[in-house]
Image: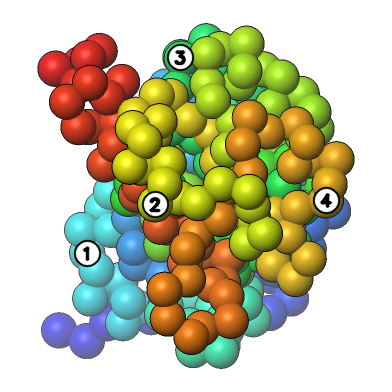
Amino acid sequence: MPPATPELISPRSPRVSAARRLAKRNFRGKERLFLAEGPQAVREAAAHRSGGTATLVELFATPDAAERYPDIVGAARDAGARVHLAAEQIIADISTTVTPQGLVGICRFLDTDFDAILTARPRLVAVLAHVRDPGNAGTVLRCADAAGAEAVVLTDASVDVYNPKAVRASVGSLFHLPVAVGVPVERAVAGLKDAGVRILAADGAGDHDLDDELDKGTMGVPTAWVFGNEAWGLPQETRELADAVVRVPIHGRAESLNLATAAAVCLYASARAQRAPGGCRSVTHG
């Protein structure tokens, strides 16, 4: 049976124009909507609820993609999203990728109030301070999700987490854990400290070595890692807010690690220490 005929074929369609505008931050903020592209992101969006409200609002799919991913289209309809069959050129117009995968969803903002994160008494948090590259932000979010972090906080000096590149780089993790946005770094640190969380700033020039911290057994407590700008790291005033400034040791000849790699190393070090005998997860949750 041949794929159905697309219903949206004109790039001047109001629905297409509205979706296309969401590539720009000011329109995303005004509408509190963002784009999720590709089968993985759309699948996660269709399954996500926030306060009982479905996150996925609308889905654009080429006929071929609708035939290839009937489960995703069905989940979108079950979530109450409007589903539009669209010509490939329409998807290309909406998409921000070079090679669109035939599915583009429109989603409601899903950021969490920072106070709600504190109330949940998190044990592992990633704080993105001054992170400007959306690909890095999305990748750190993915690392935090994989390491079992309970939350990610983006400060007011960091990139928009709903930037299409950040959403793609998170590979669906944006829909998995609470994310607070626009939090001043001073408030983020103060609030987490009040919640009993140790603050570690990740910096290549840190006074403390990550291996030494693991050997000393100091990593098993509730911890928030603060990660800085890709090019110039953390400013001195932010480092001074932390309980310790920690460097990832370089055992080989590499000059440094990029942000996402360093974040993965730090978050997994904390995750392992917290699950060891005496760590906060083993004590609290067995």
Q: Residues within 10 Å of mark 2 (few under 14, many from 20)?
A: few
Give the percent coordinates (x, y) of residue 15: 65, 61
Q: Are marks 2 and 3 in contact (CB under 8 Å)?
A: no
User: Which residue carries the number 3 mark?
Assistant: 120
Q: Quadrant of the C terminus?
A: top left
* Image marks 2 and 4: residues in contact by CB distance under 8 Å: no
Q: Position of residue 7 (x, y in %)?
A: 48, 73
Query: Mark 1 Cα within 10 Å, few/some/many (few <14, many 20+)?
Result: few
The CA span between labels 3 and 4 is 29 Å
Residue marked by disc 4:
235
- Circle 4 sits in a helix, a strand or a loop, which is it? loop
Q: Earlier in the sequence, mark 2 or mark 3?
A: 3
| 76 lies left or right of 256 | left
Tell me how far mark 2 sits from mark 3, CA to CA: 29 Å
Residue 198, above or below 135: above
Residue 186: which quarter of the image? top right
Q: Is residue 152 visible?
A: no
Residue labelled with disc 2: 211
**3 and 1 marks in contact (CB < 8 Å):** no
Tell which tag, 2 or 1, sits nearer the viewer. Answer: 2
**Mark 1 vs mark 4: which is more N-terminal?**
1
SS for callout 1: helix
Compared with 19, 123 (above or below) is above
Q: Nearer the viewer, residue 101 or 179?
A: 179
